[in-house]
């Protein structure tokens, strides 16, 4: 609760995170996430929220402060005496930053974020090549330039890289991206070589699930579903702090779910697949064919819809209905507490979120309250940069000491 006076925080006012969520994993990560969600917060209150002993909280806080991840809150007075239990601590956003990269179909986004997930700077790099090595080299150059211009004395901890399709975070590989035509691209290795940074890689739907859990609106939820509809259509599901990857990280592949009444040809050889029917390219192509926009461009279509062009709005409403029917199925199978949707119509046009919720209400057997439990992304202005950043920030907030070489890891 940024902005709350530290002195006004009473431990009992703090809502403990749901059982089974932050209580897993190394205790240092638990302390760091508690400060992220409640800071500035006194150490005595961290002990109450987490259930850790005051001595354990004191030890972890001292170590995290020494590493530059926590600091005593400004105006707390006498900041040099580390360990006094009633002095509030907060996330230190002045020592480190992280790099972020999101690879979309036509462009890559490079960005720099602070440890609270705030985007400090970002740049969009149109793809001028098809080969992954060239695309990644351009992204690395842009990221290096952004870091040089914006870190202002801070140290980059590493870079997170996100994209759609099948991403294997264990091996750091873009395993298969159907629209880019990329297969088995060793992104961690390529990007690590060109930036000299620690690199983490994950799928954007999972990255956005983690971003919501850390910095957005699902932090008090036991389970959540992330639905991404852009040129790629992907989902991710998690309970507590656990995000489901499944064997070879293939969970969430919903691109080829069948859509009632669609006969759109899909590259997989069938007709009526979800991604082929509702992708950005599919609806921008439809809009251009109908003369709604002069060329195939999602940016132009969004501008037209926001400007009140009825045919443009209607295309987004049609997409919201189709996405709603797929979402109802996923909601019934997984029954998450909340679903977060990243889709241009839902993010820009209130009527699309209403349409999506209506369709879910109509089709789902389990979802009675979509007005409360189906929401748009918390990061409408920065969603791609935030996805990339979350890929790096999630492992930091799970196991902060693993980011640092010995002797820091002794305290884990
Ligand atoms: Zn298909």
Image: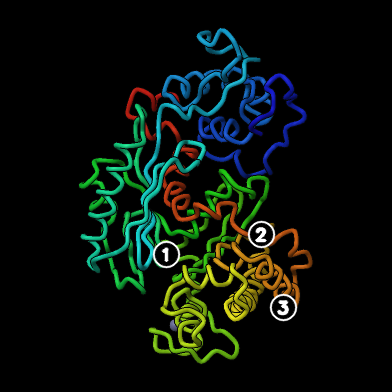
Q: Residue 65 in the image: x percent, y percent?
A: 47, 21
Question: Do tag 2 and tag 3 residues touch (Cβ < 8 Å)?
Answer: no
Residue located at (29% from left, 37% from top): 148
What is the crowding at mark 3: few (fewer than 14 residues within 10 Å), some, or many (at least 20)? some
Tell whether circle 3 marks a residue whose Cβ is less than 8 angstroms from ligand 1.
no
**In the displayed structure, would residue 27 be above or below residue 277?**
above
Question: Do tag 1 and tag 3 residues touch (Cβ < 8 Å)?
Answer: no
- In the drawing, does residue 251 fall left or right of residue 73? left
Q: Of callouts 1 and 2, which one flags the residue occurring earlier in the amino acid sequence?
A: 1
Q: How many marks?
A: 3
- In the drawing, does residue 350 fall left or right of residue 278? right
- In the drawing, does residue 349 fall left or right of residue 296? right
Q: Say which of marks 1 and 2 sits in front.
A: 2
Could you say whether the residue bearing mark 2 is in a helix, strand or loop?
strand
Q: Could you say which disc has been placed on residue 375 in the image?
A: 2
Give the residue at mark 1: 164
Residue located at (27% from left, 43% from top): 144
Q: Of callouts 1 and 3, which one flags the residue occurring earlier in the amino acid sequence?
A: 1
The quarter holding residue 320 reads: bottom right
Q: Residue 127 in the image: x percent, y percent?
A: 29, 64
Question: Do tag 1 and tag 2 residues touch (Cβ < 8 Å)?
Answer: no
Cα separation between marks 1 and 3: 27 Å
Check the picture and name the quadrant holding the N terminus: top right
Tell whether circle 2 marks a residue whose Cβ is less than 8 angstroms from ligand 1.
no
Could you say whether the residue bearing mark 1 is in a helix, strand or loop?
loop
Foreground of the two, 133 or 303: 303
Cα separation between marks 1 and 2: 21 Å
Give the residue at mark 3: 363
């Amino acid at each position: 609760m940024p902005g709350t006076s530290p002195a006004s925080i009473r431990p009992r006012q703090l809502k403990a995170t749901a059982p089974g969520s932050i209580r897993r994993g190394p205790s240092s990560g638990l302390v760091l996430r508690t400060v992220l969600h409640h800071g500035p917060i006194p150490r005595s209150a961290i002990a109450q929220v987490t259930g850790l002993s005051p001595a354990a909280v004191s030890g972890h806080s001292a170590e995290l402060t020494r590493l530059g991840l926590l600091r005593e809150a400004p105006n707390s007075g006498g900041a040099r005496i580390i360990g006094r239990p009633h002095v509030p601590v907060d996330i230190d956003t002045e020592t480190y930053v992280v790099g972020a990269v999101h690879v979309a179909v036509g462009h890559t986004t490079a960005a720099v974020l602070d440890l609270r997930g705030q985007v400090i700077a970002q740049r969009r790099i149109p793809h001028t090549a098809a080969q992954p090595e060239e695309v990644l080299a351009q992204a690395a150059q842009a990221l290096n330039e952004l870091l040089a211009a914006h870190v202002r004395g801070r140290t980059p901890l590493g870079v997170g890289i996100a994209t759609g399709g099948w991403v294997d975070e264990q091996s750091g590989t873009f395993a298969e991206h159907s629209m880019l035509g990329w297969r088995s691209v060793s992104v961690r290795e390529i990007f690590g070589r060109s930036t000299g940074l620690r690199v983490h890689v994950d799928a954007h739907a999972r990255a956005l699930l983690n971003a919501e859990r850390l910095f957005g609106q699902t932090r008090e939820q036991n389970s959540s579903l992330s639905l991404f509809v852009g040129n790629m259509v992907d989902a991710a599901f998690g309970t507590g702090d656990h995000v489901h990857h499944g064997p070879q990280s293939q969970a969430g592949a919903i691109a080829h779910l069948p859509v009632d009444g669609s006969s759109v040809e899909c590259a997989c050889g069938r007709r009526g697949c979800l991604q082929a029917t509702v992708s950005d390219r599919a609806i921008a192509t439809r809009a251009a064919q109908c003369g709604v926009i002069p060329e195939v461009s999602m940016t132009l279509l969004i501008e037209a819809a926001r400007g009140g062009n009825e045919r443009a709005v209607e295309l987004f409403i049609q997409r919201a209905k189709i996405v709603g029917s797929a979402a109802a199925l996923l909601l019934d199978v997984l029954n998450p507490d909340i679903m977060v949707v990243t889709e241009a119509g839902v993010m820009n046009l209130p009527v699309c979120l209403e349409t999506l919720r209506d369709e879910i209400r109509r089709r789902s057997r389990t979802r009675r309250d979509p007005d409360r439990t189906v929401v748009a992304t918390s990061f409408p202005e920065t969603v791609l940069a935030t996805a990339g950043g979350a890929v790096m920030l999630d492992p930091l907030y799970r196991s902060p000491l693993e980011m640092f070489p010995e002797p820091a890891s002794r305290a884990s």
